[in-house]
Image: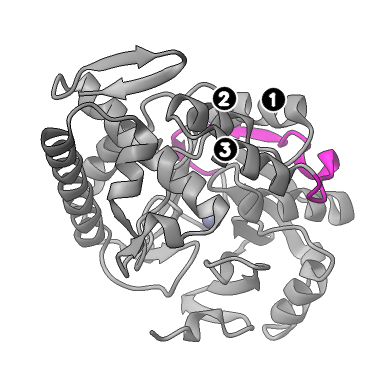
Amino acid sequence: MTLEWVEPGCHPVADGVYRIPLTLPQDGLRAVNVYVLETDSGLALIDGGWHRPDTYLEFSTALAEIGRSPDEVHDVYVTHIHRDHYTFAVELRRRHGARVHLGSKEAAGLDEIALVNSNVPETSLGELRRAGAPQLAADAYALTVDEPFDLADWETPDGWLSPGMLPLAGRNIEAVHTPGHTKGHIVFHDHDNSLSFTGDHILPRITPSIGFELGKPDLPLGRFLDSLTMMADDDTHTVAPAHGAVGGKVGSRARDLLRHHDVRLDQILEILDQCGPQNGHAVASTLTWTGRNRSFASLDTLNQMFAVCETMAHLNLLVVRGELSLGHADEVSVYS
Ligand SMILES: [Zn+2]
């Protein structure tokens, strides 16, 4: 598999649009793309990246390749609330006064982070317990409770984004609400360049994780499929993803992802058909994971957590669709 897209630098994408991949630590995603847009008054960014000790140097070194510097960034438009997208935007505000914008439906998630005041994924741990995986919840807690966490990385944005055109002089960028991966995820369409900055809503090689939530779970898979369906006919815009190379059409990739989840939903129905009533942990353990069909047992703790949460998202959608029924044994959800 080619990983050329993680090559450091400031890579031209379209007229006045550049891509800067910023390194992610110990992370299967390898890097997060920050897109730089030249505007009439300086630079705007789509996504901020993850604030780590080296991020500022990495970012300014890349920008210098086009003769620009971080203090020219006047606005950062963040696709969603995850730390690899949001926290360096806040750092750019701290250093240079850049204005930070985030989807308005992420507000409750930001409150939740302040309340938890650590990297412990409380909502997901609750899902794990409901899925019948209390030991996995305990392991995930132990792994995250001592992670470095700075609440200052999670200050509120200057602006809450709603769908519509961005007030960016010299640019024609439209914000579209695409809930699913997170509740307030935003995709930005660049109508001048037929590009879509898809964040983690549409990724080229992997399926975005669904069900890793902040706050009360809100049928994330149902929202995600609706957000994909909304873009399934878009054969105009090219995908400019947060993780991966630029390329492919939005509609074509949206249709791939819709098919993937259809297959997944069918597999889950089949498992319950064959094995009788099951909890989410049992179903997740029967499925295979990642593009390489890995067994559940071979995944590390955090990836097992993502897998169980994603399975719960599928199961809960099947209940809402009337294809499964939901019962309870103690605090655990049992599907049949
Ligand atoms: Zn991401």
The reply to whether residue 16 is in sight is yes
Q: Secondary structure at mark 1?
A: helix
Image location of residue 223, percent across then percent down: 33, 32
Q: Nearer the viewer, residue 225 or 29?
A: 29
Q: Quadrant of the N terminus?
A: bottom left
Residue 142: image quadrant is top right
Indicate which label's residue lies in the foreground, 2 or 1: 2
Q: Is residue 66 above or below residue 138?
A: below
Look at label 1 and name its amino acid.
Asp
Image location of residue 144, percent across then percent down: 71, 46
Judging by the rendered image, the residue that carries numbered circle 2 is: 215
* Label pair 2/1, CB-CB below 8 angstroms: yes
Q: Nearer the viewer, residue 228 or 126?
A: 126
The alpha-carbon separation of the residues under discs 3 and 2 comes to 21 Å
Q: Quadrant of the C terminus?
A: top left
Judging by the rendered image, the residue that carries numbered circle 1 is: 111
Indicate which label's residue lies in the foreground, 3 or 2: 3
Q: Which residues are magenta?
A: 146-166
Please name the residue shown 52% across and 66% down the image.
Answer: 29
Please name the residue shown 76% across and 58% down the image.
Answer: 51
